[in-house]
Image (cartoon, rainbow, N blue to C red):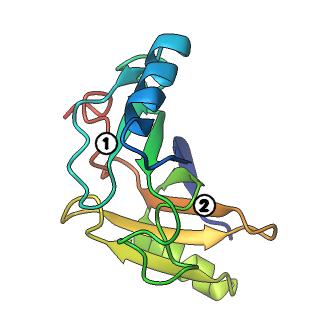
């Protein structure tokens, strides 16, 4: 059996940490690529950034920009850092996904309460070291307009 992925949610991208980097990123992603800023991004201590809607405010897909370098203040370790560049996928059942990954012997770490108190994410690496985030469909704090909340 495989983990039940139901949608591509976001792509997490690190950007520079200088005083003008966030504004340079906002300009590029909004004025060059035409993406809209999701105003619902909460303040994540130590991680300034932007959530950008891909395909308009009704889209469920986003790009998450994170202004951080090195190991972030949210990291449990160098290997367990939710700000590492990653792709995020929504799964049908986060607890079932965790059990299935464990059954298959896939290294993982679970992070709760990072984005907001209710956030719950599992991070894995593919065979090439790319980070993949899994979270419960409909439970993410981002892009609530697209989710009808």
Q: Which residue is mark 1?
A: 142
Horizontal and vertical percent position of residue 49: 36, 44
Q: Which residue is mark 2?
A: 132
SS class of the residue under badge 2? strand
Q: Residues within 10 Å of mark 1 (few under 14, many from 20)?
A: many
Height in image: 115 above or below 106?
Answer: above
Cα separation, mark 1 vs mark 2, equals 17 Å
Horizontal and vertical percent position of residue 65: 45, 42
Height in image: 33 above or below 92?
Answer: above
Quarter-of-image position of residue 20: top left
Residue at the farthest front position: 19
Residue at the spot x=48%, y=70% of the render? 122
Question: Looking at the image, is mark 1 or mark 2 earlier in the sequence?
Answer: 2
SS class of the residue under badge 1? loop
Q: Nearer the viewer, residue 83 or 91?
A: 83
In the image, taking residue 117 as reference, residue 35 lies left or right, namely right
Horizontal and vertical percent position of residue 91: 49, 56
Residue at the spot x=63%, y=86% of the render? 103
Residue at the spot x=21%, y=47% of the render? 42
- Tell me the quarter of the image containing the N terminus: bottom right
Residue at the spot x=30%, y=29% of the render? 38
Q: Are marks 1 and 2 in contact (CB under 8 Å)?
A: no
């Amino acid at each position: 059996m495989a983990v039940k992925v139901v949608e591509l949610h976001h792509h997490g991208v690190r950007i520079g940490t200088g005083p003008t980097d966030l504004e340079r990123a906002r300009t590029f992603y909004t004025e060059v690529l035409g993406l809209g800023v999701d105003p619902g991004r909460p303040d994540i201590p130590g991680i300034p950034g932007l959530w950008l809607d891909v395909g308009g405010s009704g889209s469920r897909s986003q790009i998450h920009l994170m202004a951080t370098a090195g190991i972030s203040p949210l990291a449990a370790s160098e290997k367990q850092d939710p700000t590492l560049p990653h792709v995020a996928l929504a799964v049908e059942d986060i607890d079932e996904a965790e059990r299935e990954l464990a059954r298959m012997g896939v290294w993982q770490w679970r992070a709760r309460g990072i984005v907001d108190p209710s956030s719950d994410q599992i991070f894995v690496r593919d065979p090439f070291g790319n980070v993949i985030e899994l979270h419960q469909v409909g439970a993410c704090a981002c892009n609530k307009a697209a989710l009808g909340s």
